[in-house]
Amino acid sequence: MKDRILERFLRYVAIDTKSDESSASCPSTKVQFDLLKLLKQELTKMGIADVSLDEKGYLMATIPSNIERVVPAIGFIAHVDTSPDNPGNNVKPQIHRNYQGEVLKLSKENDLVLSPKEFPELLDYIGFDIITTDGTTLLGADDKAGVTEIMAAAEYIMTHPEFKHGPVKIGFTPDEEIGRGVDHFDVQKFGAEYAYTMDGGAIGELEYENFNAAHAKISIQGRNIHPGYAKNKMINAMLVAMEVNAILPVNERPEFTEGYEGFYHIVKMEGTVENASLQYIIRDHDRAKFEKKKEFIKSAVAYMNERYDNRITLELRDQYYNMREKVEPVKYIVDYAEEAMIAVGVKPVIVPIRGGTDGSRLSYMGLPCPNIFAGGHNFHGKYEYVPLDSMVKATDVIIKILSLVVDRK
């Protein structure tokens, strides 16, 4: 299985599937269909009859139950797109066999290295085979590692008819990296009672709570006057934007927070004297604190409007909510995943997600959906890597969950 998983992963990351936030189409980029069509072809070749790919880039498949007793249909979901933050084409993975704690060279041209001094978690993978970038692109383990694991599990099920399982639902989505991953996901068509996203990080991660999330855009209308005659007349929109940002608490930025602590994160700023804009993401696990953060940014804008004669506008929208509220009533699905990890020799690490997954939105759409590790580290950048052995274990976890459900009365 290990060799097959490696071969599959290398095949998938070679396909550019970068999403594009500026595009209004779904999927946001046509290249995502290149991988989706390949996955559909491979699922069909395995002998899975019920496979569909719609025009919006949602691929679904069903492996029917092979037992007489009725058990829940369980879904496994991953996204095919990669982050637009770094190049996702011409990916050239490097395989470092039997890692022993050394510094891993990524690129000779720009001296990029993966060092345990900067990334101490590397030392958790002594003896593992580690797949890295070549220092020029991202790797795409987010979430082609998850795609690989689901496909490997499907292949195992279809080639081992003696393995007993209930209905297995497979879902691949587009555009997760730009926050649109389940905009058009048909939960009823998917047909699972509950599901798992294979989109977590390090081996053992198991998550069923995440940030509540909002997006804020603050636009400032300045007044541009020739600087030689600007006294008491000019309003520099960029300086007003800087004042707005200075109101927000410094200790509630991402670089100063961890665990359950929320933050305001400025993700984009643009401006001239005449016009400027700021974009933020607002995050907190606690719903009450999340609402207070939104009220604070509203009050900051209101205060600045008093100073600058209503030249500032705020667009504020919620993005997703903490899945814990929807998963806790059926927490046995988390227990299944935890028990499966222990059974295959993986120590579960149950932590809150300092981010979001498709599963958080799906949980509010009626499909409870915890998140299981896919194995990767340093997502979205040139330092991204994934231990091959972690992908093997993630595949084992999928198979074991299906087995545990059959064993339960």
Image (tube, rainbow, N blue to C red):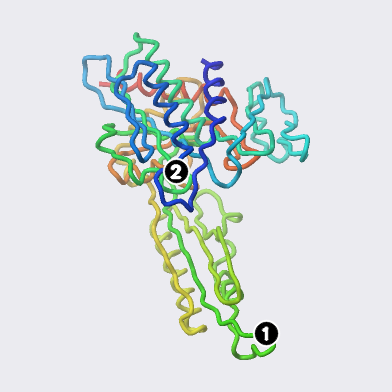
Label whose residue precedes the other's in the sequence (2 or 1): 2
Amino acid type, mark 1: Pro
Q: Which residue is mark 2?
A: 176
Residue at 49% x, 73% y is 300
Mark sitting on residue 227: 1
Question: Horizontal placement of 298 versus 226: left or right?
Answer: left
Q: Secondary structure at mark 2?
A: helix
Residue at 34% x, 10% y is 161
Residue at 35% x, 46% y is 183
Name the spot of residue 244 as percent of width and height, x first.
55, 72
Name the spot of residue 158 as percent of width and height, x first.
37, 14
Q: Nearer the viewer, mark 2 or mark 1?
A: 1
Amino acid type, mark 2: Glu
Q: Residues within 10 Å of mark 2 (few under 14, many from 20)?
A: many
Q: Secondary structure at mark 1?
A: helix
Q: Quadrant of residue 402?
A: top left
Mark sitting on residue 293: none
Total numbered labels placed on residues in the image: 2
Which quarter of the rendering shows the C terminus? Answer: top left
| On screen, residue 244 above or below 285 | below
Between the C-alphas of marks 2 and 1, the distance is 45 Å
The answer to which of 171 and 203 lies nearer the viewer is: 171
Question: Horizontal placement of 82 versus 358: left or right?
Answer: right
| On screen, residue 278 above or below 7 | below
Name the spot of residue 47 as percent of width and height, x first.
35, 15
| On screen, residue 171 above or below 241 | above
Question: Horizontal placement of 146 versus 386: left or right?
Answer: left
Question: Horizontal placement of 339 versus 247: left or right?
Answer: left
